[in-house]
Amino acid sequence: MQRHCCDGMRAQLDLSGVAYEDPWDDPDVVVVYTAKFDEYGLPVRDGGSSMVVIGHCPWCGTRLPQSRRDAWFDEMDRLGLDPWSDELPEQYHSDAWWGPQEGSQRDFVEPERVISPA
């Protein structure tokens, strides 16, 4: 049986009603998504783009996808790139490097407009 995440998460990831120029400054935005790592989190309001990664939807408890952060760094090692000093190929700045498959269905929320830290 597939479980789908709730409307609470979908509403949080829809930034169409965000009042602030930078959504990271909006206290009403409580969940963020980073496509590069395929991870969801709670933003840390310290002036940067830090977040506390979460593994389950805070509203319904649905399991969110496992982070691809470790795989991303493994890929950097495989390519011989230093992510802090080398210029990275464009696909490694988004989800293009792990590529959600066309037509595939995920059993959790599929973000459309989200805060995505640079």
Image (cartoon, rainbow, N blue to C red):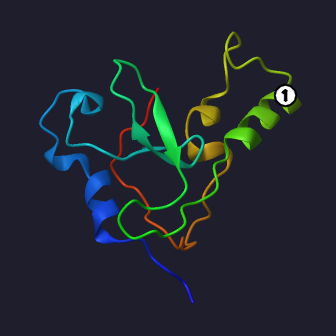
Q: Secondary structure at mark 1?
A: helix
Q: Nearer the viewer, residue 70 or 58?
A: 58
Residue situated furthest bottom in the rendering? 1
Residue visible at 55% across and 56% down?
Answer: 55
Give how far across and how far down residue 17 sits, in percent. 14, 47
Residue visible at 63% across and 49% down?
Answer: 67
Question: Given the image, on which type of amino acid does mark 1 rest?
Answer: Asp
Residue visible at 78% across and 29% down?
Answer: 76
Residue 48 occupies quadrant: top left
Q: Nearer the viewer, residue 13 or 47?
A: 47
Give how far across and how far down residue 38 sits, in percent. 57, 49
Residue visible at 79% across and 36% down?
Answer: 75
* Circle 1 crowding by C-alpha within 10 Å: few under 14, some 14–19, many from 20: few
Residue situated furthest top in the rendering? 85
Image quarter in which the N terminus is found: bottom right
Q: Is residue 71 above or below residue 48?
A: below
Horizontal arrangement in the rendering, residue 74 relative to residue 39 (left or right): right
Horizontal arrangement in the rendering, residue 82 relative to residue 1 (left or right): right
Residue 72 occupies quadrant: top right
Q: Is residue 88 above or below residue 67?
A: above
Q: Which residue is mark 1?
A: 77
Horizontal arrangement in the rendering, residue 42 relative to residue 64 (left or right): left
Give how far across and how far down residue 112 sits, in percent. 36, 54
Give how far across and how far down residue 109 sits, in percent. 43, 65
